[in-house]
Structure formats: C-alpha cells, structure tokens
Image: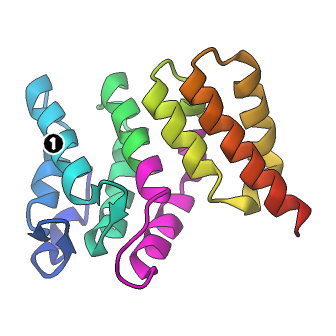
C-alpha cells in the first residue's frame, strides 16, 4: 500500500507552509490505529495541501494516495468520510498562482471522481457540501451527477446542504444549457 509515496521528491514541492516534506508522513499516519494520530493527520493535510480553499503544488501529488486510502479496507469509515471531504475540497479549490495547481488538482481527483459519489448521501453535512461543490466542477459528468444531486436534494433536510446542492445543480444546469 502507498507504493511510490516515498519516491516523490516532496521536499522540492510546496504547500501552504513551504516545503511539503511532511505530506508523506501525514499520509502514512492515516493508516494508524490510533484515532488521535489519524485525526491530527487529517487536520494537518487540510491545513497544508488545501488551506482555506487554496491548493498548492503538492496537492495534486497527494491525491492518488488519498484515493488509494479511500478505497482501502484498512481505513475506517470515519476516516474515509474525512478523506472524501478533503478530496472534494481540493477539487473545488483554487490557487493564487496561475490556476495550474487547481487544474492539476482537479485532473487528479477526476481520475477517481466516482469514489466521491456515495459521500453525497452521507450523514455529515460538511462532507455532503464538499462533494456537491466538487461535482459542480466536472460538467463533463453532468449526465451522471445531475440526477444524483437532484435525488440528494429531494431527501435532504439540512438547510446549508440543500443550498450547496441547489448551487451545484444550477451551475451544472447552466453549463449544460450553454453547451
């Protein structure tokens, strides 16, 4: 598991706080059986490869490993919800450079985008909101995602989640109409 993670020159990549050499350590910690270690790793990853909506050079490099963990039976369901939220947040992120980090990050998430679909229906509002926001970025999947979003909206009770789903539906519907 996580083959190739340690072969990336993380010290040459950057995230919100500079050199990204801590990223592989944090990703490995996601496999810990200690909940505090896992929670801290998630917190740190949210702070450095996705920081307040911004993605960085190291973000796209981390995504395949986060996706691998999301698929793994070695990762508990709570951690998977956090990983889905992190991946979706990164897909919906931006960068302060020239857009290339956001583009690379979105492209990396897209390779396994369908991994995020089930989390649109999870019971954690922030995860649902993140998934809806991410799905609105991938208009090429509108035939698949628009019905999912409409189904989620029909059964959703949380006001904030409903607003985010409506926003995603409107974005996708608008792009579909303009195609």
**Which residue is at the far bottom?**
98
Q: Is residue 34 above or below residue 72?
A: above
Q: Is residue 135 left or right of residue 103?
A: right
| Mark 1 Cα shell of 10 Å, populated few (<14), some (14-19), many (≥20) | many
Residue at image point 44% right, 81% down: 100
Q: Quadrant of residue 81?
A: top left
Residue at image point 37% right, 56% down: 53
Q: Is residue 112 above or below residue 85?
A: below
Residue 99 at x, y = what percent? Answer: 45, 79
Q: Quadrant of residue 102?
A: bottom left
Indicate yes or no whether the magenta region holds residue 27: no
Can residue 34 be seen here? The reply is no
Residue 82 at x, y = what percent? Answer: 34, 35
Examine the residues drawn in magenta and state their main secondary structure.
Answer: helix
Q: Which residues are magenta?
A: 88-117
Q: Is residue 129 left or right of residue 28?
A: right
Q: Is residue 66 left or right of residue 94?
A: left
Q: Which structural element holds mark 1?
A: helix
| Of residues 173 and 151, the one drawn nearer to the viewer in this rendering | 173
Q: Which residue bears the numbered disc 1?
A: 41
Can residue 21 be seen here? The reply is yes
Residue 94 at x, y = what percent? Answer: 43, 67
Indicate yes or no whether the magenta region holds residue 97: yes
Q: Is residue 105 above or below residue 160?
A: below
């Amino acid at each position: 598991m996580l083959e190739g993670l340690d072969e990336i020159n993380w010290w040459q990549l950057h995230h919100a706080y500079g050199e990204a050499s801590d990223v592989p350590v944090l990703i490995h910690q996601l496999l810990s059986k200690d909940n505090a270690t896992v929670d801290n790793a998630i917190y740190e990853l949210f702070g450095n490869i996705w920081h307040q909506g911004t993605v960085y050079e190291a973000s796209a490099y981390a995504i395949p490993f986060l996706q691998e963990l999301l698929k793994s039976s070695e990762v508990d369901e709570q951690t998977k919800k956090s990983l889905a939220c992190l991946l979706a947040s990164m897909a919906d992120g931006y960068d302060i450079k020239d857009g290339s980090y956001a583009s690379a990050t979105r492209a990396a998430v897209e390779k396994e985008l369908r991994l995020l679909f089930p989390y649109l229906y999870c019971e954690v509002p922030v995860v649902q909101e993140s998934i809806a926001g991410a799905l609105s970025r991938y208009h090429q999947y509108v035939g698949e995602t628009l019905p999912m979003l409409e189904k989620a909206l029909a059964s959703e009770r949380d006001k904030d989640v409903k607003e985010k789903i409506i926003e995603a539906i409107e974005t996708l519907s608008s792009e579909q109409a303009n195609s």
